Image (cartoon, grey):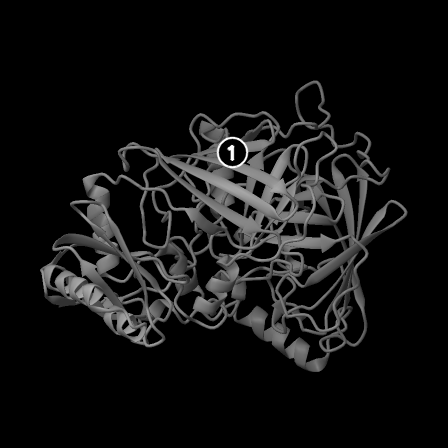
Amino acid sequence: MPFYRIMLAGVFVVSAPAQWLNYPSPGIPRLPDGKPNLSAPAPKAADGKPDLAGTWQPVPGYTVNIAKDLKPGEVPFQPWAETLYKHRVETEGREDPQARCVLSGVPRENVVPYPFKILNTPAAVVILYEALHSYRQIFTDGRPLPKNPNPAWMGYSVGHWDGDTFVVESSGFVGNNWLDNSGHPGTEALHLTERFHRRDFGHIDVQMTIDDPKAYTKPWMVKLGFVLADTELIEYVCDENEKDVTHLVGK
Amino acid sequence: MDMRSLAILGCVAPFWYASVALAQSSGTIFGTIFDLSGDPVANAPIQATSRATHALYKATSTTGGRYTLSRLPPGAYDLSVAAPGFNAYSESNLTVVAAQTLPFDIHLIDYQLGTLGDGREFRIDQTSPHAAPPGPAPRTPEGKPDLSGVWYAQRPVDPGKPEPLPWVEKLLAERAANNAKDAPGARCLTRGVTLAGALFPYRMVQTKNLLVMLFEDDIPSHRQVFLDGRGHPKDPNPSWMGHSVGHWEGDTLVVETVGFNDRSWLDPQGHPHTEQMRVIERLRRPDLGHLEIEFTIDDPAAYAKPWVFRRASDLDVKDEVGEYVCTENNRDVEHMVGK
């Protein structure tokens, strides 16, 4: 199933069956050749803030290892978390919940190679993910994070603007989170801070601070990004004809 | 029962004789209504419809689940039970004979599997009318009604009357006979457009060019309705949710959806459809607290006529849609073995 979109993309080049996918997003400034002008200025919402709305895809490269730009030893693991991480790597993700069609969760949705759509509304920023047909709500109505939330893969998120940067604070995560495909652990103590900055029409810079004192000795930070995707989401039904999980046997 | 109460009221001979005469010339159906675990179902409304005269006879089950439909003129009857939290039940062509009592027990099928969190009580709570805040429907800057908000699951207002083609009748009978064991939802497959909002709360998020529905139900799932004037793709990828576009007719949002696969169930009974199905939804928000939805199922390969049914949702001002991960610790599917 994770290969579905990759396969479709391959077919798309030769036979173009996919007008569904090839529906150019309205409202995107375009170059003379019709391609999106990714370096055009970022659009503004009615309140004058940058509008994050659009269909996006994570910058490639971080799917497997969210910490790929960090030097070895820079991820400040607690000993048990390092042991668990090594186990997950050595067993080739055999226990990956996402392979069992459980949600990817946050922040993993920021790095898996599927498009997602951001909607900007007065009370919330809503993200529709193609991956696992899931969604995320980031409340912007001024409410605080709940003190004792029901643990969730997506956590509970509130957002506010810091100048031109949209700052999202999240907590309320499940205890057996995978932050990326290789399985950097996250626990229910995770407090995630994401800073989203739409630097131009086609790019959002993302800075994430992972503060999870149960799994890590101190907060650590990664920088990645999103690129505008000139496409439409397609339906992803993980449990339909799922044939992957039986092959997840480790080494 | 009637006779006793009449006697207690001190009613005299003519009534007594009339009752006796009626009892001799009419018949009775009685029995107990059970759920799947064999427990009695109280307060279930049951009705018998005469096939000859279309006259309706109604009763409600007692706390012990018992019902009595008495004083039925002899003839053939269709029986139906519409109890909250259960699939609609019907049995056709029961024969009532004068001065005889027909024992007939009924076994209802739960909407859900009765597992923690999605049991019958939850279903009843979701689909019972809730007090909604008063006030006018909010409007968008463009002056259209804004459907945004968290809504309780859609409760049936008018189930309509599907006219299934023979292959659909046959399939429905099979699905009823095997206790709906192949329901896609039990295998964490997407519910489709008529079911996704029918069991759990959902949030509508309306922007100028896009209406989004966030369903608590499912894996979870979401649905997009394009309001930017685009049409349908010519050859859409068949999908559970289809491809939806909407336009306004006055204050009614008319949503047309095509591009379905043929796997989803339209309701818990398992009404099927084909890839040719076209669904029209007419959505109205008459005031702040209420949403009205009229569905038209247009699928000539499955139903002789378009099937129109109506539902309503109340605004939920207390809750958000929660996270529902169907595949996490799913213990149900191994029990879906049919009869």
Q: Is residue B262 visible?
A: yes
Crowd rating for badge 1 (residues with CA inside 10 Å; few <14, some 14–19, many 20+): some
Q: Label 1 is placed on what type of residue? A: Val
Seen as rendered, the residue at the extreme top is A32
Seen as rendered, the residue at the extreme right is A163
Position of residue A9 measured from the top left corner of the image (x, y, whole percent): 51, 38
Q: How many marks?
A: 1
Q: Is residue B33 visible?
A: no
B197 w.r.t. A75: above or below:
above
Task: Give B73 or B39, whichever is nearer the viewer.
Answer: B73
Position of residue A29 measured from the top left corner of the image (x, y, whole percent): 73, 25
Task: Give B7 or B242, whichever is nearer the viewer.
Answer: B7
Task: Identify the residue under disc 1.
Answer: B255
Task: Give B318 or B66, whichever is nearer the viewer.
Answer: B66
Chain where mark 1 sits: B
Q: Is residue B194 left or right of residue A165?
A: left
Q: Tag 1's secondary structure?
A: strand
The residue shown at (71%, 30%) is B143
Q: Is residue B204 left or right of residue B11?
A: right
Position of residue A194 measured from the top left corner of the image (x, y, whole percent): 77, 56
Q: To which quarter of the image does residue B113 belong?
A: bottom left
Position of residue A172 measured from the top left corner of the image (x, y, whole percent): 69, 68
The residue shown at (68%, 73%) is A188
Task: Give B40 or B234, whichever is nearer the viewer.
Answer: B40
A63 w.r.t. B295: above or below:
below
A77 w.r.t. B192: above or below:
below
Seen as rendered, the residue at the extreme bottom is A80
Q: To which quarter of the image does residue A76 belong?
A: bottom right
